[in-house]
Image (spheres, helix red, strand yellow):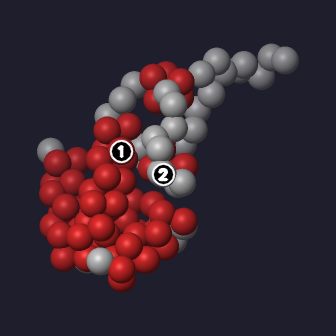
Amino acid sequence: MAGTCSMLCLIIITLFVPPLGVFMISGCGVDFWINVLLTILGYFPGHIHAFYLEYVYYDRRDRDPLTRASQQPAPGVYSDRIQNGGHRHVPAHPSYGTM
């Protein structure tokens, strides 16, 4: 339930200010600055980019960690936080201290 509420709040924020929605999921990185530029050039391209990033973020957030680690990177997404769905990158085969 908490995930759904945060997702709806993020969508509402993105409807009014697309760069703010991107900032909330990716931080102040390349994806944020691309969205700022797209929003300045045209409000509609900023929306498309922001909703695409949010889709990738929430899609990968709900996946199994092993599936998330082995999947291909989403095209046009430069933030590791979005690529991993907000999770820390976990190796597919942990060594548990043995080398």
Say which element carries label 2.
loop
- Taking depth in this image into account, of 84 and 48 the one nearest to the observer is 48
Quarter of the image containing the N terminus? top left
Q: Most extreme residue toward the front, as rendered? A: 41
Q: Which mark is residue 56?
A: 1
Q: Which mark is residue 70?
A: none
Q: Position of residue 83 (x, y in %)?
A: 48, 44
Q: Position of residue 31 (x, y in %)?
A: 48, 63
Q: Residue at left 66%, top 21%?
A: 94
- Taking depth in this image into account, of 90 and 58 the one nearest to the observer is 58
Residue 87 at least partly seen: no
Residue 40 at least partly seen: yes
Q: Position of residue 67 (x, y in %)?
A: 45, 23
The mark that comes first in sequence, 1 or 2, is: 1
Q: Are marks 1 and 2 in contact (CB under 8 Å)?
A: yes
Q: Residue at left 72%, top 19%?
A: 95
The image quarter containing residue 17 is: bottom left
Q: Which residue is mark 2?
A: 77
| Residue type indicated by callout 2 | Val
| Residue type indicated by callout 1 | Val
Q: Residue at left 47%, top 69%?
A: 34
Q: Residues within 10 Å of mark 2 (few under 14, many from 20)?
A: some
Q: Residues within 10 Å of mark 1 (few under 14, many from 20)?
A: some
Q: Position of residue 7 (x, y in %)?
A: 21, 54
**Real-space Cα separation, disc 1 to disc 2, in angstroms:** 9 Å
Q: Is residue 87 above or below residue 17?
A: above
Say which element carries label 1.
helix
* Left or right of residue 75, residue 96 in this image: right
Q: Residue at left 47%, top 51%?
A: 76
